Image: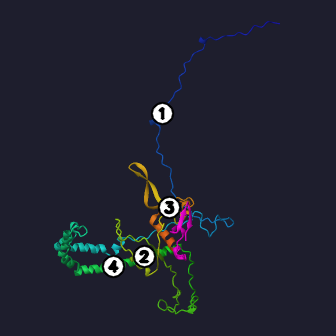
Amino acid sequence: MTPQEPPETHTMEPTDIPMTPQEPPETHTMEPTDIPMTPQEPPETHTMEPTDIPMVSQEPPENQPMDFEPDEPPPNKPKVSRVPRSHSITAENVNEISHMNKIAKRRRTRLNDTTVKGALKAISDPTKSLKRAVTMKEVDEAHHIRSEHRKTLQGFETTNARLKDQQTQRLRTNQAWKKLGSAERHYVQEAGREQSDLPPTVPPTISPIDGFCSECQRHHVPNTFDQDFAYSTQCPHLEPQTLLPVMITGLAGTGVGSRIGGHTRRGGKKLRHEHQQHCVVALTDEFRTSKVCIYCFHQVQQARSRRLINGEIKTVRVHGALECTNPACPSFQEGYTIKPRDPHAAVAIALAGISALSNPQRQPIAPFSRNFVRVEGHGSLVV
C-alpha cells in the first residue's frame, strides 16, 4: 500500500480574477418625430335606407292560439272613447259671414260729415244723458238736445245708401244663420255615422239583361243618355241611409243680453229656430252637467297644473279643463283623466236630454235629476 498525496488545491484571490469593464447595453429612445404618421381613413359606414330593409309580412301559424278573439279589439286599443271635438260658433263667425264689419266700416266713413258727426257727438255726451238726469232741469236739457238734432240724424239714417246697407245686412244675417246651422247639423251627422253600429245598406241586384230590380220587383227603364241601350246599375228608388240628428239645448240660455263683460254674444234663439225647420230640437235642464263625469258619474274638479312663475314652481288651476279623480272610473284606468270642459258638458247635456226623452216620466237619469238626493255618499231618487 503506497500512500497517495492529497490533490493540490488552489484558492483564487479576488485580485486574481481579471476585471474586464463591460459597457452598458445600448438603449435607443424614439422621439415623436421618429414615428411615421400615416393618415388612417375612417371605417366605411353604410346607412340602410328604408327600401333596403326587406319587408316580410309575418302571419301567425294556423295552430297557434291567439291572445284575443278576431271580433274583439286588440288589447292596446283604449276601451273608452274620448270626448269628441266641439263645433263652436262664435259671434265673430256671424259678423264675418253677414258682412257686418264691412257695413259698419262703411257707416263710419259716411259719418265724416261735420254736421252729422257733431249731432251724434252731442247726443252721446254722458253728462247730457237721460240715465244720469236727476232734476227736472237736467231732464229738460237732455230732451232739448235730442229734439234739436233729431232731424239731422234721421236724415242720415234714412238715406238710400243706409237703407240699402240695412236691407243687405238683414238678408246676409239670415243667410249666415242658415249656413252655420247646416254646418252644425252636418257635423253631428258625420260624428254619429262614425260612432253608429248600423249595418251597411246592401245595394239591390239589377239584371244587366232586362233591368229587373230585386228590391223593387220591377223592370227599370234603360238609361239611353250615357250609353246605347244600357240599363242602370243603381236603383233610382234607393235612398242613401241618413241619420236624423236630435239637437238638445240647455235651458240656461246663451248669455245674450247679459251684463257680464267678455266676448260679444249674438244669436240667442235664432240658431234654435233654424234647427227646428230641419230636425228635432229638445230643451233639457243643465243641472250638474258640468260637475259630473260622463264615464263614472262622479264629481269632477277643475284640472290643475304645475307652472314656473317668477322662479317658483306653483300649482295653478287650468281654465277650460276638468279632471276625474275616481280610481274606479274607466277613463281614469285608461289614463284619460283630463277632459275639455265645454265638449264634456255638451256630452253630459246630451245624456241628460236623451234619457229624459226616453223616459215616460220625462225625468233624466239620477246624476242629472233634481229629485236625486245624495245622503252620506249614497243617493236616493225622490218621486
- Looking at the rendered structure, the secondary structure element under dot 3 is loop
Q: Earlier in the sequence, mark 4 or mark 2?
A: 4
Q: Which corner quadrant of the image does residue 360 belong to? A: bottom right
Asked if disc 4 and disc 3 are in contact, CB closer than 8 Å, the reply is no
Task: Report how far apart the C-alphas of labels 2 and 3 lie in the structure.
Answer: 31 Å
Residue 312 visible in rendering: yes
Q: Earlier in the sequence, mark 1 or mark 4?
A: 1
Q: Earlier in the sequence, mark 1 or mark 2?
A: 1
Task: Report how far apart the C-alphas of labels 1 and 3 lie in the structure.
Answer: 80 Å
Residue 96 picture location, percent across and down? 33, 73
Please tell me whether residue 269 belongs to the stretch shown in magenta. no
Please tell me whether residue 161 is drawn above or below residue 130 in the rendered image: below
Q: Residue 30 shows which numbered tag?
A: 1
Task: Report how far apart the C-alphas of labels 4 and 2 lie in the structure.
Answer: 16 Å
Q: Callout 3 environment at 10 Å: few (<14), some (14 to 19), or many (20+)?
A: some
Q: Residue 183 shows which numbered tag?
A: 2
Asked if disc 2 and disc 3 are in contact, CB closer than 8 Å, the reply is no
Viewer-closest of 211 and 146: 146
Residue type indicated by callout 3 = Val
- Looking at the rendered structure, the secondary structure element under dot 4 is helix
Viewer-closest of 175 and 193: 175
Residue assigned mark 3: 300
